[in-house]
Image (cartoon, rainbow, N blue to C red):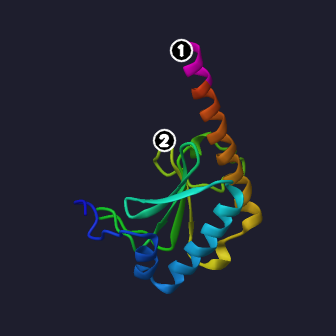
Amino acid sequence: MNKFQPVDFQTLDDLLEFLPADEQKIVEVLRKIIFNCIPNCQEKLSYNVPIYSRYGRICFLWPGSVPWGGMKTTGVRLGFIRGYQLTDEVGYLDKGNRKQIYTRDFLTLQDIDPEVLKPYIIEATILDEEIAKTKKASKRKWV
């Protein structure tokens, strides 16, 4: 357990059991969309919330019931690690006062529109692949 969180989940099941039913349903729907959009997606807990990656971290889900310091949100927040690099001409993502991570909050299941959300996840996955290729190519130059 860290000083910012009074919870410490060992597994995703521990997290899901902790969540109120409405947040649990939102998390489950978002997880399905993420797994459908990110091939070979890896899911692990970090800061007591699920983080999704392939070559690097792509996105995370932060249920409002999982506290961080004194901050509390409602619903479930989907965050994109490199949100600042995503195409977002319609302003779907919340930039807040953050420089890199952009988010979208879902208060109900009806807030989730897979057809709007999927392109963001797919673009974030393509960006992750491109960054991995660039890193691999730059390593070859030095070898």
* Quadrant in the rendering for residue 30: bottom right
Q: Position of residue 65 (x, y in %)?
A: 40, 74
Residue at x 59% of width, y 78% of height: 108
Q: Which circle's residue, 2 or 1, is located before the other in the chain?
A: 2
Q: Amino acid at mark 1?
A: Val
Q: Is residue 31 magenta?
A: no
58 up-or-down from 22: above or below: above
Circle 2: element type: loop
CB within 8 Å, label 2 to label 1 = no
Q: Which residue is mark 1?
A: 143
- Name the residue nearer the viewer: 137 or 25: 137
Spatial distance from mark 2 to mark 1, Cα to Cα? 33 Å
Circle 1: element type: loop
Q: Nearer the viewer, mark 2 or mark 1?
A: 1
Q: Main secondary structure of the magenta part?
A: helix
79 up-or-down from 17: above or below: above
Residue ranking furthest to the bottom: 21
- Magenta residues, as a range? 137-141
130 up-or-down from 32: above or below: above
How many labels were placed on the picture? 2
Q: Amino acid at mark 2?
A: Lys
Callout 1 crowding tier (Cα within 10 Å): few <14, some 14–19, many ≥20: few
Callout 2 crowding tier (Cα within 10 Å): few <14, some 14–19, many ≥20: few
Q: Which residue is mark 2?
A: 99
> Residue 55, which numbered label?
none
